[in-house]
């Protein structure tokens, strides 16, 4: 009859709780003492610890990968959309600019004033075009926020 008479019993069912810190001090002591003298339970404890660690690492790396993918997607989408708008607006500006320039330098029956008026009309159309584009962009942004709220 010793104080640790039950240290001979295997503690397999306590090991998981031991790692998770869910045992009472008495139970923890029993596991420690038993594992000091029982190679079976000691190796089970080591295996369990490794398993927990691997699960933890897997979860962590999954999260990291998701975060990375999310931020990549976000950046790529923003950059692509930005370049798209830049090309669209830049192309429209150049197209209209060239059109107006050619229209003004091309000899025709129209007087310079008449050309300026027509040029003004095209310029106005361009401004409307740009403002519509801006409006679309703003609407699209607020649509996205609406989606998030729903
Ligand atoms: Zn044991």
Image (spheres, rainbow, N blue to C red):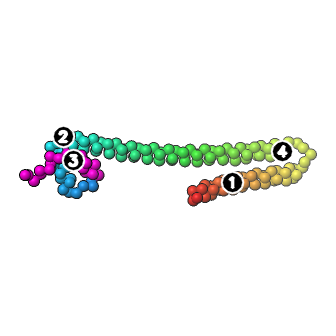
Q: What segment is highlighted magenta in the picture?
A: 1-20
Q: Which residue is mark 3?
A: 11
Asked if the residue at label 4 sits under 8 Å from ligand 1, the reply is no
How far is the residue under mark 2 from the one under mark 1?
71 Å
Q: Residues within 10 Å of mark 1 (few under 14, many from 20)?
A: few
Earlier-in-chain disc, 3 versus 1: 3
Q: Secondary structure at mark 2?
A: helix
Q: Secondary structure at mark 1?
A: helix
How far is the residue under mark 3 from the one under mark 1?
68 Å
Q: Residues within 10 Å of mark 3 (few under 14, many from 20)?
A: many
Mark 3 in CB contact with mark 1 (< 8 angstroms)? no
Which quarter of the frame holds ligand 1?
Answer: top left
Residue sitting at 30 percent across and 42 percent down?
50
Snapshot quadrant of residue 127: bottom right
Residue sitting at 66 percent across and 56 percent down?
139
How far is the residue under mark 2 from the one under mark 3?
12 Å
Mark number displayed over residue 136: 1
Asked if the residue at label 3 sits under 8 Å from ligand 1, the reply is yes
Q: Secondary structure at mark 3?
A: loop
Which residue occupies the extreme right position in the image? 109
Q: Residues within 10 Å of mark 4 (few under 14, many from 20)?
A: some
Q: Nearer the viewer, mark 3 or mark 1?
A: 3
Earlier-in-chain disc, 2 versus 3: 3
Earlier-in-chain disc, 2 versus 1: 2
Mark number displayed over residue 103: 4
Tally the marks.
Answer: 4
How far is the residue under mark 4 from the one under mark 1?
30 Å
Mark number displayed over residue 39: 2
Q: Position of residue 114 (x, y in %)?
A: 88, 52
Residue toward you, 32 or 131 = 32
How far is the residue under mark 4 from the one under mark 2?
94 Å
């Amino acid at each position: 009859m010793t104080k640790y008479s039950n240290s001979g019993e295997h503690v397999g069912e306590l090991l998981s709780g031991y790692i998770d810190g869910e045992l009472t001090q008495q139970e923890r002591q029993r596991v420690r003492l038993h594992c000091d003298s029982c190679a079976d339970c000691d190796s089970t404890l080591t295996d369990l610890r490794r398993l927990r660690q691997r699960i933890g690492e897997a979860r962590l790396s999954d999260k990291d990968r998701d975060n990375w993918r999310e931020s990549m997607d976000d950046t790529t989408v923003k950059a692509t959309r930005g370049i798209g708008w830049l090309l669209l607006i830049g192309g429209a500006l150049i197209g209209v600019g060239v059109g107006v320039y050619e229209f003004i330098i091309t000899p025709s029956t129209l007087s310079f004033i008449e050309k300026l008026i027509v040029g003004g009309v095209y310029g106005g159309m361009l401004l409307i075009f740009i403002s519509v584009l801006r409006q679309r962009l703003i609407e699209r942004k607020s649509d996205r926020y609406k989606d998030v709220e729903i």
